[in-house]
Every structure is written in C-alpha cells, then in structure tokens.
Amino acid sequence: MEAPHNGPAAETAAAPDAVTVRIAVESPEQMTELGRELARLLAPGDLVMLTGELGAGKTTLTRGLGEGLGVRGAVTSPTFVIARVHPPLADGPALVHVDAYRLGGGLDEMEDLDLDVSLPDSVVVVEWGDGKVEELSDHRLHVVIDRATGDTDDERRTVTLAGVGTRWADLRTRIGGGTAG
C-alpha cells in the first residue's frame, strides 16, 4: 500500500464531518475493481461526486460502479450528452452518470437534468460536480482521484473517499484496503 497522498484534489473532499479513506490504485483494472467494490456499498438515493483531472480515472471508476450495480449499457464518458441513465438489468437501482464539466453554474443550471427527481430511485454519479450538486443530498460520497501530472504514463492513483453525512459514518469499516484520512 502506498503512503497517503495529500494533493490539492484530496483537500477538496475534506468536509468537516467527512469520514475519509485513502486507497492506492496501481492500474486501470484496479480502478474498475474499486468501482465494483464501491457498488456493493451503494443504494438508491446515493449521490457520488467524482473529482480529478482529465484522465484521472473518473469514468473508469464509474464503469466499475456500473458493472457492480448490474446496469445495462456500456458506461462511457457523458461529456457531450451531459447525462446518461443506465437502467438495472435486474433488481437494483439505475445508474445516472453525469458529467458537469461543461456546466458552469451551480445546481440551478443542472435543474434541467432533474437529478433531484432521479436521486431517490437511482445512484447518481456526477463527475466535476464540486460546487454544483452538493445541495442534492446531505449524505454523499465524494471520490477524489489524484494522479501524477505532466508528461507521464504513470498509472498510479491515490483515491480519497470522503463520506459526508450519517449514511457514510461507518465508511472505514465498510471499505477494505485503505488508510484512514
């Protein structure tokens, strides 16, 4: 396990009441597997916010979430369509995957997506949602992915999970392989 990393993105997740866990991820395959593992913790009504630079692995993690939730359709970046809904193949919640990168405003600009309507019955994952979707739920899982920047093909990432609200108070005991933040 790699030592905890305290990059600028990791500080973003540090809400005063957040329970944090840091996980070292060595490859895209491990990022997908982390998504599958996190999917076991998710339930309808959960809001997951993903933060990280371009190419950090946000969509790769979401692909693993989709596999773990057992949803229909290939999970790809919704950058140009803003949001995609992946219905469940069996019992379980749909996955609503949003990319808020091109949306400049806060929740007001995102109202047309009806995320507040989708949230109770779905798992809503928002890439680039900082400052835009926090008002949707008092309980959310903020996932921050830090990677080496610059001209590098280093696949290593440090993933900081920050559980905000009572729903995530026991995050450290529910996720394995991390270090407390």
Image: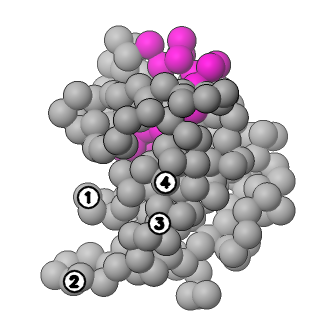
Mark 1 nearby-residue class (10 Å; few <14, some 14–19, many ≥20): few
Percent of width and height locating residue 121: 62, 20
Residue type of the residue flagged with mark 4: Gly
C-beta proximity under 8 Å, tags 3 and 4: yes
Q: Earlier in the sequence, mark 4 or mark 2?
A: 4
Q: Residue at x 49, y 71 (%)?
A: 30
Residue type of the residue flagged with mark 1: Leu
Provide the residue designation for mark 4.
64
Q: Is residue 152 magenta?
A: no
Asked which secondary structure carries label 1, the reply is loop
What mark, if any, has residue 54 been given in the picture?
A: 1
Residue nearest the observer in this picture, 103 or 159: 159
Residue 33 visible, this angle? yes
Question: Viewer-nearest of labels 2 and 3?
Answer: 3
Mark 2 nearby-residue class (10 Å; few <14, some 14–19, many ≥20): few
Q: Residue at x 37, y 35 (%)?
A: 73
Residue type of the residue flagged with mark 3: Met
Percent of width and height locating residue 178: 68, 74
Asked which secondary structure carries label 3, the reply is helix
Above or below, 106 relative to 130: above
Q: Quadrant of residue 60?
A: bottom left
Q: Residue at x 49, y 43 (%)?
A: 66
Provide the residue designation for mark 3.
31
Residue type of the residue flagged with mark 2: Thr
Q: Quadrant of the N terminus?
A: bottom right
Magenta span covers which residues? 114-134
How far apart, in angstroms, are the residues tagged by discs 2 and 3?
18 Å
